[in-house]
Image (spheres, rainbow, N blue to C red):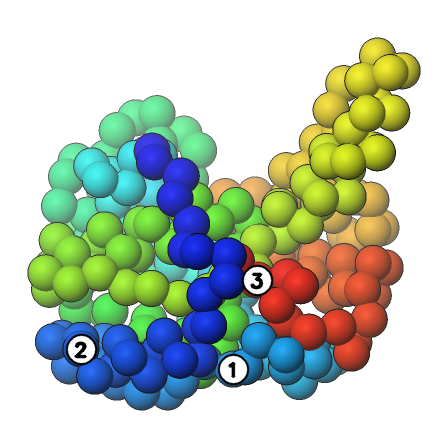
């Protein structure tokens, strides 16, 4: 899948204001009207929402979202009571390869709604918050592609990528040079392996809601170990 990111110097707050005026889809208009925090907002004041998708494959242009999990949080609290989980029905048959990974079968989604029926609830749950994901090339492009297929308009928003934060610390700069010099294999930055480095508990994998909670906990730990609560959100988002 193409790995494209917004421009590094984008002013998300102003960009949301512009998108609120130019968007045609009412649900997206409402989403953008909730605004986006300023880039200098301290991390302690940022309203986050951890998001995870399970999909029928890895190509956002052809594969579809089959499970959505999200949970709002901040640096001091994960709001489990406000967590949400959906099983939207894809418009294509499930491939046996993906069923092995996420464990969702045809019987699980026989009576499930199409993604279009839950999009309003999903957008409402993330509006006004900064989505946190582990590997941004899934959630943002898949939601964008899903919206384009259903309402003929995509979506734009910033994300904090906990995998990218781990890569900065373990696969870039001096850490990368040292590992290569010593002949070591690159440090794993998968969600489960990253959590081990912060002594976080092991959870079962490939359940959208569980992975969203795991991602929220990971970001809390990353910030406590490597950042300050006064650090601006611009140091983390992309």
Q: Is residue 203 above or below residue 128?
A: above
Give 89 or 132, whichever is nearer the viewer: 132
Of the numbered discs 3 and 1, the one sitting upstream in the chain is 1
Place residue 33 in its image quadrant: bottom left
The residue sitting at the top extreme is 183
> Is label 1 in contact with label 2 (beta carbons under 8 Å)?
no
Give 1 or 79, whichever is nearer the viewer: 1
Q: Residue at x 61, y 57 (%)?
A: 215
Q: CA distance from mark 1 to mark 2?
A: 19 Å
In percent of width and height, residue 99 lies at 35, 33
In percent of width and height, residue 232 lies at 68, 74
- SS at mark 3 in the image: loop
Q: Which residue is mark 2?
A: 22
Place residue 44 in its image quadrant: bottom right
Q: Which residue is mark 3?
A: 237
Q: Is residue 79 above or below residue 68?
A: below
Q: Which residue is mark 1?
A: 37
- SS at mark 2 in the image: helix
Of the numbered discs 1 and 2, the one sitting upstream in the chain is 2
In percent of width and height, residue 214 lies at 63, 56
Q: Is residue 152 above or below residue 34?
A: above
Q: CA distance from mark 3 to mark 1?
A: 11 Å
Discs 3/2, front: 2
Q: CA distance from mark 3 to mark 2?
A: 24 Å
Q: Residue at x 23, y 51 (%)?
A: 145
């Amino acid at each position: 899948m193409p790995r494209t990111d917004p421009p590094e110097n984008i002013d998300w707050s102003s960009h949301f204001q512009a998108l609120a005026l130019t968007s045609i889809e009412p649900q997206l208009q409402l989403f953008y009207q909730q605004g986006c925090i300023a880039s200098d907002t301290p991390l302690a004041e940022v309203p986050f929402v951890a998001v995870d998708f399970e999909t029928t494959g890895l190509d956002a242009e052809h594969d579809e979202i089959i499970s959505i999990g999200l949970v709002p949080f901040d640096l001091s609290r994960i709001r489990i009571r406000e967590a949400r989980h959906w099983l939207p029905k894809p418009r294509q048959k499930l491939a046996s390869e993906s069923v092995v990974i996420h464990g969702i079968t045809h019987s699980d989604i026989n009576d499930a709604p199409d993604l279009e029926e839950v999009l309003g609830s999903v957008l409402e749950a993330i509006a006004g918050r900064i989505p946190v994901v582990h590997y941004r090339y899934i959630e943002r492009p898949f939601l964008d592609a899903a919206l384009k297929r259903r309402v003929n308009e995509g979506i734009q928003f910033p994300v904090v990528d906990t995998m990218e934060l781990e890569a900065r610390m373990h696969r870039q700069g001096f850490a990368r040079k040292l590992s290569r010099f010593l002949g070591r294999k690159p440090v794993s930055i998968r969600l489960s392996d990253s959590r081990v480095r912060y002594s976080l508990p092991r959870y079962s994998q490939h359940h959208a809601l569980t992975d969203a909670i795991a991602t929220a906990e990971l970001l809390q730990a990353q910030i406590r170990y490597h950042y300050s609560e006064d650090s601006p959100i611009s140091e983390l988002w992309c």
